[in-house]
Amino acid sequence: MNDPINQECALEGWAEIGKMFGMAESTIALRRKELLECGAVFYILRGKPPKRHKIICAFPSMLKLWAQKKTIRGDRL
């Protein structure tokens, strides 16, 4: 039932997300607000209190949809 070929893994961190588009970590992080508002990225909590911290994550398919919508509108990535 759980076909590993059809499963998608989330990217963790701005570095991995930026690497998908060939951008630097800081460049893609500047688009944080836009990506959060459209639902392309999300935060997960990792660790146990008091050292719990938020990690930015994204699914590649959601990032591709965001990029497609941006290019259709005529915006640059």
Image: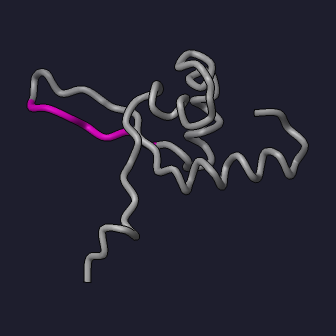
**Horizontal and vertical percent position of residue 54:** 31, 30
> Which region shows up in magenta?
42-48
The relative height of residue 69 versus residue 6 in the rendered view (above or below) is above
**Residue 51, image quadrant:** top left
**Residue 44, image quadrant:** top left
The relative height of residue 71 versus residue 30 in the rendered view (above or below) is below
**Horizontal and vertical percent position of residue 67:** 70, 46
**The furthest residue to the front:** 5
Q: Nearer the viewer, residue 8 or 36?
A: 8
Residue ID at (24%, 26%):
53
**The furthest residue to the right:** 74
Residue 31 in the magenta stretch? The answer is no
**The furthest residue to the top:** 26
Residue ID at (53%, 20%):
25
**Residue 50, image quadrant:** top left
The relative height of residue 68 versus residue 74 in the rendered view (above or below) is below
Applied colour scheme: one colour
**Horizontal and vertical percent position of residue 13:** 40, 30
Q: Main secondary structure of the magenta part?
A: strand
**Horizontal and vertical percent position of residue 9:** 36, 53
Quadrant location of the N terminus in the rendered image = bottom left
Q: How many marks?
A: 0
Residue ID at (60%, 43%):
37
Residue ID at (90%, 43%):
74
Going by the image, does 53 lie left or right of 7?
Answer: left
Going by the image, does 36 lie left or right of 47?
Answer: right
Quadrant location of the C terminus in the rendered image = top right
Residue 43 in the magenta stretch? The answer is yes
